[in-house]
Amino acid sequence: MNEIPRPPDGEVVPAPMPGAQPIVLRPGEGAPPAPPQGRGLSPLNRRRLDNFRRNRLGYASFLVFVALFVTSLFAEVIANDRPIFLSYKGEWLFPVLVNYPEEKFGGFLAVTDYNSPEIRKEIAENGWAVWPPIPFAYDTINQDLPTPSPSPPTWMLTDAQCKPVAEKLGGSTCADIPWHWLGTDNTTRDVLARVIYGFRISVLFGLILAAVSSVIGVIAGAVQGYFGGWVDLAFQRFIEVWGGIPTLYLIIIISAFIAPGFFVLLGIMLLFSWVALVSVVRAEFLRARNFEYVRAARALGLSNLRIMTVHLLPNAMVATLTFLPFILNGSITTLTSLDFLGFGLPPGSPSLGELLAQGKDNLTAPWLGLTGFVVIAAMLSLLVFAGEAVRDAFDPRKTFR
């Protein structure tokens, strides 16, 4: 047979029909563009992200929630009774990060009280300091209040009420004293500072609990749904018994033996919170385990672990991600409820639930209950709006249109 001659500087593509002229692709002429380098979002995930951004309320709620949470991470810089940093006798000090003994400033105590007039005078004479915008930490006790505790917000007071305290500081009006923007609680602690610290603790608790419980729930649901049979049956009976244990009563019993703290509560809640996602992931694995591509993967000799993690888990994660904001919402609500009942964080810890409890016990101080209600309602509302936006973004009816 005669062969089609190949040009020296090109590439010959054989003609599909006899008698047709060969197609010569020369370098740089008509060649398809090279695929883009680098790893980015797939077209499907880009569509989901676009759908999420189109939901203005949910996307804005997500941004606001993230901004508030990131801001709360710097609570020590925003609300504290220590300087952020100071220059003392030519030395740079960072009291927010380091506990300096009072002997460094000419005293004799083990811990420096930066609100002491003597310490403030010593720093002013030998250097300068930069203070946080809110000069109170969550546990700062203010002995000089214009009115008995719980004291209303400073902007609600008159100059006559502030005058006795202002005169001690060399002033005469409310503008001359440190302001409590949201008032104080029944132990003279600043409410705004406690809200900032309490918001951070609530969100961190919810994020850790939601993340770890989701991992455990996804693993348990994947094993049940993929293997089925006796494995699924045994797991289901165990979950029915385990999920029927009253968590609140268990926490009350444990609190009678040990003082409940952040990690103690987190560990107890993790024992039961993972059950929420098991049924969702199990259903996804049960539905997809007999699909053709899964059978083909088994025929090719892929291990069960690889099939579960590479081929089935991405489909199950869609349902999991839509549930995560609501699991986070429930985790925060649980911690708030326990603090409100007195079985949560140790006494004195900044807590939104404890602020609500103080509002219930001090009906003559409405700023306590109103502040706690507004903060919790706003935080949970932002999470719900963001969760609905995530759910709509992963909705196949909207993703593939």
Image (tube, rainbow, N blue to C red):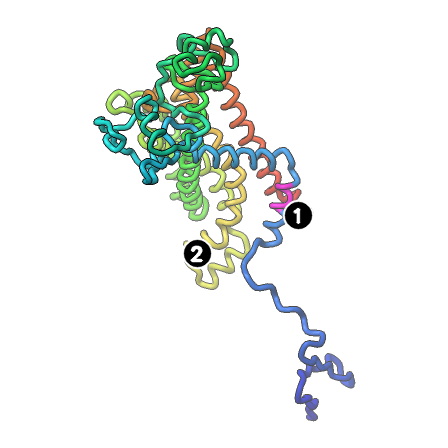
Q: Is residue 263 magenta?
A: no
Main SS type for the magenta part?
A: helix
The residue lying toward the viewer, choosing from 354 and 108, is: 108
Q: To which residue does mark 2 refer?
A: 306
Q: Amino acid at mark 2?
A: Arg
Q: Give the side of residue 397 with respect to residue 117, left or right.
A: right
The amino acid type, in three-letter code, at marker 1 is Phe
| The residue stretch that appears in magenta | 48-53
- As drawn, the residue found furthest toward the left would be 108
**Horizontal and vertical percent for residue 298?**
46, 59
Secondary structure category for the residue under label 2? helix
Provide residue 245's location: percent of width, then percent of height: 36, 26
Query: Which residue corresponds to the image point at 68% horizontal and 93% vertical from the top-left?
Result: 1
Q: Would residue 399 be found to the left or right of residue 110 on screen?
A: right
- How far apart are labels 1 and 2 at the CA level? 27 Å
Which residue is painted at 75% across and 81% down in the image? 17
Residue 249 seen by the camera: no
Q: In the rendered image, which residue does mark 1 sit on?
A: 400
Assign a secondary structure to mark 1.
loop
The image position of residue 341, as x and y in percent, is: 38, 17
Closer to the observer: label 1 or label 2?
1
